[in-house]
Amino acid sequence: MVPGPSTETYAPADCAALLAVARASVERGLRHGSPLVVDPADYAEPIRALRASFVTLRIGGDLRGCTGRLEPEYPLVVDVSRNAYRSAFEDPRFAPLRAEELRDVEFHISVLGPREPLRADSEQALLEKLRPGIDGLVLRDGSAVATFLPSVWENLSEPRRFLHELERKAGLPAGHWSPTLQFERYEAFQIPESSSANSED
């Protein structure tokens, strides 16, 4: 993992650029069936750095797609373009986004900070270490892997429910515990699109 402060922030202009790239990538996907090709050299240095991101699509507050990566493999602006496209058209939980839905989509970008192991020998011990509203959580147990972004706390504010829903997402039963369970936590810089940003005719 590329090191970096968990409190990393981005200037408003960089946030606007990332949101514009996310929307443009989905627009290109609707027209041509492929994501926007981004040249990092065209963008400010902070969003050219290697970073891991997730892009979440919402319509009327409801989830419409969310994909991303945990490892920083690409410049952030490239990663956002790819993840926006994947969220719109390749999230297996949803049908591909339709053109008539785009005007109602709100884009939310999460830039992940470094992960740190979160060790606990019981569910209760883990729950006591979780920081609601702050921690994103990665769960691994064998081939089962899942993560919840810090923004998920908005809908799952109770730590035990947060954990149990993450276990279900990983294909495990709620309340599952085993010696092979591994957890990592991370913070994320959130870039939400204003609901007014895409309300023009």
Image (spheres, helix red, strand yellow):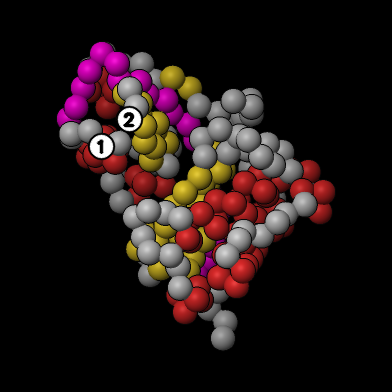
Using residue 48 as the reference point, say whether residue 128 is left or right of it.
left
Q: Is residue 191 magenta?
A: yes
Query: Does residue 193 sit above or below 144 in this rendering?
Result: below
Q: Which image quarter holds the N terminus?
A: top right
Q: Amino acid at mark 1?
A: Gly
Please say if 200 is above or below 76.
below
Give the CA separation, mark 1 to mark 2: 7 Å
How many neighbours does mark 1 have within 10 angstroms: few (below 14), some (14-19), or many (20 or more)?
few
Which mark is drawn over residue 144? 2
Marks 2 and 1: in contact by CB < 8 Å?
Answer: yes
Assign a secondary structure to mark 2.
strand
Location of residue 200 (image quadrant): bottom right
Residue for point 58% across, 38% down:
52
Q: Which residue is depicted at the point 44% across and 19% down?
A: 117
Q: Nearer the viewer, residue 94 or 198?
A: 94
Q: Is residue 134 left or right of residue 143?
A: right
Q: Quadrant of the C terminus?
A: bottom right
Q: Is residue 139 magenta?
A: no
Few, some or many C-alpha atoms within 10 Å of disc 2 (few <14, some 14-19, many ≥20)?
few
Q: What span is in magenta?
A: 175-196
Q: Position of residue 115 (x, y in %)?
A: 50, 27
Q: Of 49 and 172, which appears nearest the observer?
A: 172
Q: Residue at point 31% right, 24% down?
A: 141
Q: Which numbered disc flags the more N-terminal residue, 1 or 2?
A: 2
Disc 2 residue type (three-letter): Ala
Q: Secondary structure at mark 1?
A: loop
- Give the image location of residue 171, x and y in percent: 25, 37
Q: Along the horizontal axis of the image, is 9 left or right of 169?
A: right
Residue 147: x percent and y percent? 39, 37
Relative vertical location of residue 176 with respect to residue 112 in this rendering, above or below:
above
Tell me the residue that label 1 is attached to. Answer: 171
